[in-house]
Image (cartoon, rainbow, N blue to C red):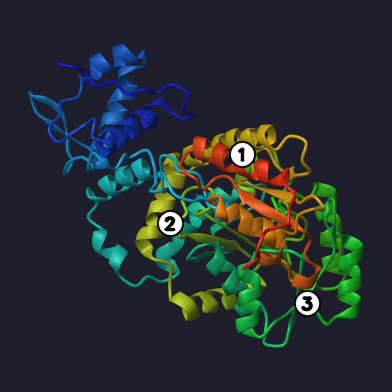
Amino acid sequence: MTIWLPNLADRPGPKYRLIVEAIGEGIANGSLTDRDRLPTQRDLAFRLGVSLNTVSRAYAEAVKRGFLRGEVGRGTYVRTGGPLPADEPAAHMTRPKDGPIDFSLNLPAAGQAQAALAAALGSLQATTALASYLDYQTDGDQVRHANAAAAWIGQLGLNVSSDDVVLTVGAQHGLMVAMLALMRPGDVLLTEPMSYAPVKAMARHLGLKLHPVAMDAGGLAPEALDAACRTTAAKTLYCLPTLHTPTTITMTADRRQEIAVVAQTHDLTVIEDDVFGFLLPDRPPPLAHFAPERTVFITGASKSLAPGLRVGYLHAPNQYRRSLRAAVNLTCWMPPPLMAEIASRWIEDGTAQRLNAFQRSEANARQAIARRTLQGHDLSADPFGFHLWLPLPPHWRADAFRVAAERRGVKVLTAETFAVDQAAAPQAIRLCLSHEATQERVAEGLAVIAALLQEPGDAGVLVV
């Protein structure tokens, strides 16, 4: 009989918690099934080289989460409804393994989110409060989730309390909420010349006017922002200071300070989009750190943990919170309690940190593939970013390159997708490396891109 032993190597965090996570993952991937007997506490402690108290604490927590049950005089057994289907490996989210290689979607890599979700749902089975996750909730009911959000955001360098937090259904919803709360039809919204694509659609539907503000190699240019404030009636700026989409630029702390000074000078409210902030192991403080009294800071779980975890967090000064919460109520009434509960549990038990660490590691590995494959080409990328920015050589137009790439089974997005003024869009493409299921498919797609860059270009390519 094989004795189950958890593999705790290369995992950060308290040992007892790692044992619990390993049990949950074993249940999720089918290596532990209902009524499997686990080693005695003393035996497991000896085999792992940890204290008996550590294993006792782990087993107690696993029982609390609904993973195990103890039978007096008989031992400790797995408690589960059964393993996942054999053709659905717990270690990966569902991503195509064949067909077109998609570099157009800026989503996290497939990691251990499925196994973590199975563990979280197994833990929820043991609670007596399941009905509350299907009921309407008030701000008071969400205090625990706000506390978890404050702890999560605090890792980015902001001093956050739960009172500062507004929960949304993902960061994109948070952006819509901020625009609804802070602006009125006809208002001017300042933003980078190329920006997060849905901003253009949101502005159009809300009757807002977008005004592009020039960037330089360091990101949004303070002088250009100052000029825009003087020549327009704008009172709101939307920007992405960290891993800017699509150019990958991350503003330095000095540049953020300069932008904050301009915002203060012109009484400008800043909407700071920081969805990629958790990817960088060493990053400047958020812009909100330099202008906390006038910045609505937006982040969420979908880019750093799992795309379907639609939980967003707004950090905002007191004068904006009532309007932000009213906008949440108007657009969705409340974030789904079950989704918020999963995110909070992951933040509290260390799962979020582990999943995010995987994203950093995987992004770093895929960026290394890109550097090797596209060596010699003019590209912008961060070693820990999901995407890269590739200005095209003079013999290629972006729309023709996109069509040529798609004909060879690779999807990309051109600069026009992100440009506020499409006529001014550069001849460049954005490549997202994280969505594909494997590094092998990333390498295959990048090889296609590298070969295309060497070809004659627009000649013979019909743009449709």
Location of residue 44 in the rendering, given as x and y in whole percent from the top left corner: 27, 17
Picture residue at 66% right of the left edge, 73% below the top: 200
For the C terminus, the image quarter is bottom right
Q: Which mark is residue 235?
A: 3
Distance between mark 1 and mark 2 Cα atoms? 30 Å
Q: Secondary structure at mark 3?
A: loop
Q: Secondary structure at mark 2?
A: loop
For the N terminus, the image quarter is top left
Classed neighbour count for the residue bearing mark 2: other residues with Cα under 10 Å, few (<14), some (14–19), many (≥20): few
Please indicate whether residue 214 sits to the left or right of residue 358 in the image: right
In the rendered image, which residue does mark 1 sit on? Answer: 447
| Quadrant of the rendered image containing residue 59 | top left
- The reply to whether discs 2 and 3 touch (Cβ–Cβ < 8 Å) is no
Q: Amino acid at mark 3?
A: Lys
Q: Amino acid at mark 1?
A: Ala
Q: Earlier in the sequence, mark 1 or mark 2?
A: 2
Q: Nearer the viewer, mark 2 or mark 3?
A: 2
Classed neighbour count for the residue bearing mark 1: other residues with Cα under 10 Å, few (<14), some (14–19), many (≥20): some
Residue 431 visible from this viewpoint: yes
* Callout count: 3
Picture residue at 41% right of the left edge, 48% below the top: 96
Q: Secondary structure at mark 1?
A: helix
Location of residue 66 in the rendering, given as x and y in whole percent from the top left corner: 22, 42
Residue 61 visible from this viewpoint: no
Q: Which mark is residue 308?
A: 2
Location of residue 172 in the rendering, given as x and y in whole percent from the top left corner: 56, 66
Q: Earlier in the sequence, mark 2 or mark 3?
A: 3
Residue situated in front as seen by the camera: 421 or 97: 97
Distance between mark 1 and mark 3 Cα atoms? 45 Å
